[in-house]
Amino acid sequence: MNKKILGGALAGAMLLALVGCASGGDDSAGGAKDPSDIVVGFAQVGAESGWRTANTKDIQSAFKDAGIELKFSDAQQKQENQIKAIRSYISQQVDVIAFSPVVESGWDAVLKEAKDAGIPVVLTDRAVDSKDDSLYESFLGSDFVLEGQKAGEWLVNEYKDTTEPVKIMQLEGTTGAAPAIDRAEGFAEAIKDDGKFEVVASQTGDFTRAGGKQVTEALLKSNPDVDVIYAHNDDMGLGAIEAVEAAGLKPGTDIKIITVDAVKDGMQALADGKINYIVECSPLLGNQLVDVVKKVVAGEPVEKRILTEETTFDQEQAKAALPDRKY
Ligand code: GZL
């Protein structure tokens, strides 16, 4: 290449480099972007429960209202599918990756790939057990241990005037999932000092209605005299109701049922007296996630742990709350 063309090429390259920086092309340094220029990749767990459906709907509508592009994937409750989706978002060079880890473990490698690619990650709903919290900007979701404690505390109070043994069947969420691990831990913590309580059977129903029904049918055969069913979510509790009725028993009366979530179907069963107590777990994380994404893109600080507000419902409270429930 002769000197004249070489000189022109160098000048052009320098000009491009300047323009690139000037137009904010280098996002790694942060800097507010118009929402319409932000692209987020979201790797959802699946569509296993009423809670998940409500969570997906809320996140999609929040990003639509914010004018931010949301690439969305449904992993059908398989970790390998979530990892594939995250890798795809990395190759598409999205501005932020958000996801709800289906299980706690096994994320460090792919989260390091995102970090090395300069793409910030936000955890929503469920946590990871990684020791390196530099792998994500923030974890936005409920305190599942507290949810389990609230369920156990209601049970302790419900049986405070009896000394008879109380046999409990526990329907666990997805094996290895943070809400399953933590709700079991919190519940056990709350009942441990009262010797009349015994968890006589505990098995995963994978957070689904079908799983709750199948497991309850099986466990009732081997434990026909259980007094209480503690289900880690409404959907498994609704499946348990079907199994209890098929066994000729009255759910909420012959066998008390406690669940977590407070989705519409669960609240209706509570109002109808088939469930006795529900601990709320809010799926409405969309607006908070939009807020975190905007701050992360703008290079503003975000809290490492953002808790969601939630309450509890007994049967009377459910009747009053049902007309206004959003999900
Ligand atoms: C809890 C969420 C759980 C719900 C289930 O935040 O991860 O997963 O309790 C859902 O209904 O399947």
Image: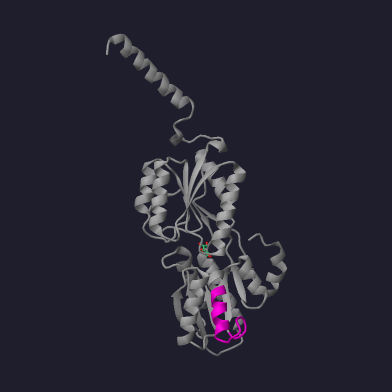
Residue furthest top as drawn: 4
Q: Residue at x 47, y 77 (%)?
A: 215
The percent coordinates of residue 23 (x first, y second) are 49, 27
Residue 65, compared with residue 6, is above or below; it is below
Q: For residue 101, which quarter of the picture?
A: bottom left
Q: For residue 276, which quarter of the picture?
A: bottom right
Q: Is residue 62 visible?
A: yes
In which quadrant will I find the C terminus?
A: bottom right
Report if residue 241 lies within the magenta region.
yes
Q: How is the image coloured?
A: one colour
Q: Residue at x 62, y 68 (%)?
A: 265
Residue 251, compared with residue 304, is above or below; it is below
Q: Nearer the viewer, residue 80 or 96?
A: 80
Residue 99, compared with residue 51, is above or below; it is above
The percent coordinates of residue 3 (x first, y second) are 29, 10
Residue furthest bottom as drawn: 164
The percent coordinates of residue 299 (x first, y second) are 50, 39
Q: Classify residue 155 as left or right of residue 104.
A: right
Q: Classify residue 91 as left or right of residue 152.
A: left
Q: Nearer the viewer, residue 322 or 316?
A: 322
Q: Which residues are magenta?
A: 238-254
